[in-house]
């Protein structure tokens, strides 16, 4: 028997296109500069289209996608082009406006090339903040003021949670160095708007006082600059640079903890500026009395002016934040979706805005209308942490499945026992496993008020320990959340 003969055909693999190599080089730069989640959402869907000389054309999935890149990543794209094509490289967008089908090719439109962002390449200044320019070395003294023009008082939503801080900030912005709020210390947890507020102050001053030099810097950057100044034997230039500033905004002063030499230098800069009537603004994640690892003389000076806190926004403020964000993006969303998001995300403003961005991106990429179902799916992927945090939706699903009823029945106005008891259990578990306030829990159960939620929780508490069946049911339901 003739043995089976095997034949192999070696197919020639086509060499990679030049446009692919250039875009991959861009992506390497971009990937190092932003969080992985942002990279996956905004850059992985992009496809390199063509390369014509020094003009790179990339294809993006929608008009919204293009506008988001232009509004939020134009500086990063500029840096990537500098790295991959040189300083004369240009970027053009090809936007898919119709994905097409088997018969018709996708319909695309082209947008003009990306222009160099303003002030991205002016001449370096010689230790003069008035001629600030984005640096080649991010920790050198050749610095821009690093104020983000997108932060303003107009888009900072005022509520009970931040009214004192905003009012004080606006007073400082109108009369820098002339109020009793010097220094102004703004503190609060992550994502509540500290950086937004202090940069809004800085932007207002820059726009209304041509003679004022405003410097915004994080404490980490300040420390790195100080270390570089020592290494390069230019410590005097470092001190001179900061002592020329009229308004110094330093973010996250808690990170100066334990850095004794940096604190010494900051102390002298602080004293010099304060004595000259210059404005000092700081942020921290906690009030001065709770800061550890900072010198007592610094802490005492932090208390000279006004200390104002930012708290977690209440439901009404969250609604206003969502509406303002949607208005800025030119996006219309049904009020039911806005209410759902506001009730579901109550931790901080940053997470709330992140959910909105993800919602808009999901809608743009999948060409779906933003409805409650899309909001639920988005929240499930974003709000839930690695430990699979229990959400009110999962509680409702598990309780409804356990009692073999529809979630709609649980949310309905029905007073039947087969619906009331599961509803009370679900509310009880929602209070136990989520951080939602009673008002938000009631919203998720057909818009009931907080007194109904209180009654439900009390009813279950009275049965616990007195009714073996209820004890067993609660134990079984809790097991699903482990």
Image: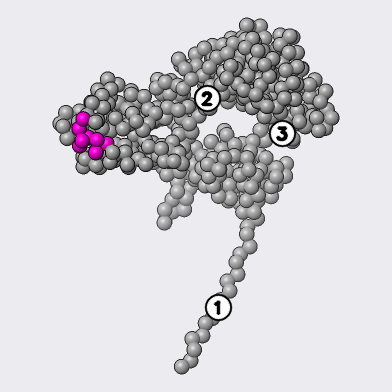
Q: Is residue 126 left or right of residue 15?
A: right
Q: Quadrant of residue 409?
A: top left
Q: Is residue 102 left or right of residue 149?
A: left
The reply to whether discs 3 and 2 touch (Cβ–Cβ < 8 Å) is no
Mark 3, residue position: 138
Does residue 227 sit above or below 101 in this rendering? above
User: Which region is colored magenta?
Assistant: 466-474
Counting from the top left corner in percent of width and height, residue 482 is at: 37, 41
Instruction: Give the number of the disc on residue 200.
Output: none
Mark 2, residue position: 189
Counting from the top left corner in percent of width and height, residue 400 is at: 25, 39
Mark 1, residue position: 8
Given the current orientation, which residue lies at the most extreme right position? 233
User: SS at mark 2?
Assistant: loop
Q: Do we see residue 287 in this rendering?
A: yes
Q: Do we see residue 198 in this rendering?
A: no
**How would you rate the neighbour count of disc 3 (Cα within 10 Å): few for under 14, some for 14-19, many for 20 or more?**
few
- Residue 432 counted in the magenta span: no
The foreground one among 185 and 31 is 185
């Amino acid at each position: 028997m003739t043995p089976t003969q095997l034949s192999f055909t070696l197919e020639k693999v086509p060499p990679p296109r030049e446009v692919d190599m250039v875009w991959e080089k861009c992506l390497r730069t971009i990937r190092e500069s932003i969080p992985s989640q942002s990279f996956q959402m905004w850059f992985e869907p992009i496809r390199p289209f063509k390369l014509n000389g020094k003009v790179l054309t990339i294809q993006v999935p929608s008009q919204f996608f293009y506008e988001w890149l232009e509004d939020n990543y134009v500086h990063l794209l500029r840096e990537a082009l500098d790295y991959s094509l040189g300083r004369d490289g240009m970027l053009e967008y090809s936007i898919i406006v119709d994905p097409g089908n088997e018969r018709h090719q996708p319909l695309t439109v082209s947008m003009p090339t990306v222009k160099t962002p303003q002030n991205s390449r002016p001449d370096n200044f010689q230790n003069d903040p008035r001629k600030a320019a984005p640096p080649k070395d991010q920790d050198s003294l050749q610095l821009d003021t690093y104020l983000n023009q997108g932060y303003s008082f107009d888009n900072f939503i005022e509520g009970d949670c931040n009214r004192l801080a905003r009012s004080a900030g606006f007073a400082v912005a109108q009369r820098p160095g002339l109020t009793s709020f010097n220094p102004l210390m703004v503190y609060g947890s992550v994502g509540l708007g500290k950086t937004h507020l202090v940069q809004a102050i800085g932007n207002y001053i820059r726009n209304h006082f041509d003679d004022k030099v405003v410097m915004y810097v994080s404490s980490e950057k300040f420390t790195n600059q100080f270390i570089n100044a020592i290494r390069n034997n230019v410590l005097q230039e470092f001190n001179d640079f900061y002592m020329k500033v009229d308004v110094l905004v330093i973010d996250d002063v808690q990170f100066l903890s334990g850095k004794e030499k940096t604190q010494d230098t900051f102390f002298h800069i602080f004293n010099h500026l304060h004595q000259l009537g210059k404005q000092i603004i700081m942020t921290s994640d906690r009030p001065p009395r709770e800061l550890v690892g900072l010198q007592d003389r610094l802490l005492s000076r932090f208390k000279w002016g006004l200390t104002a806190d930012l708290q977690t926004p209440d439901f009404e403020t969250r609604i206003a934040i969502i509406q303002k964000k949607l208005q800025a993006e030119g996006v219309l969303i049904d009020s039911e979706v806005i209410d759902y998001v506001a009730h579901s995300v109550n931790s901080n403003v940053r997470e709330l805005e992140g959910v909105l961005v993800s919602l808009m991106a999901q809608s743009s990429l999948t060409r779906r209308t933003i409805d409650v179902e899309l909001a639920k799916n988005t929240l499930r992927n974003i709000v839930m942490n690695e430990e699979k945090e229990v959400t009110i939706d999962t509680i409702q699903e598990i309780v409804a499945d356990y009692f073999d009823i529809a979630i709609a029945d649980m949310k309905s106005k029905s007073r039947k026992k087969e619906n009331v008891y599961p509803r009370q259990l679900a509310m009880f578990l929602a209070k136990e496993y989520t951080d939602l306030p009673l008002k938000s829990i009631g919203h998720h159960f057909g818009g009931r008020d907080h007194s109904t939620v209180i009654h439900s929780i009390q009813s279950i508490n009275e049965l616990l320990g007195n009714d073996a069946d209820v004890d067993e049911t609660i134990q079984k339901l809790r097991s699903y959340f482990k």
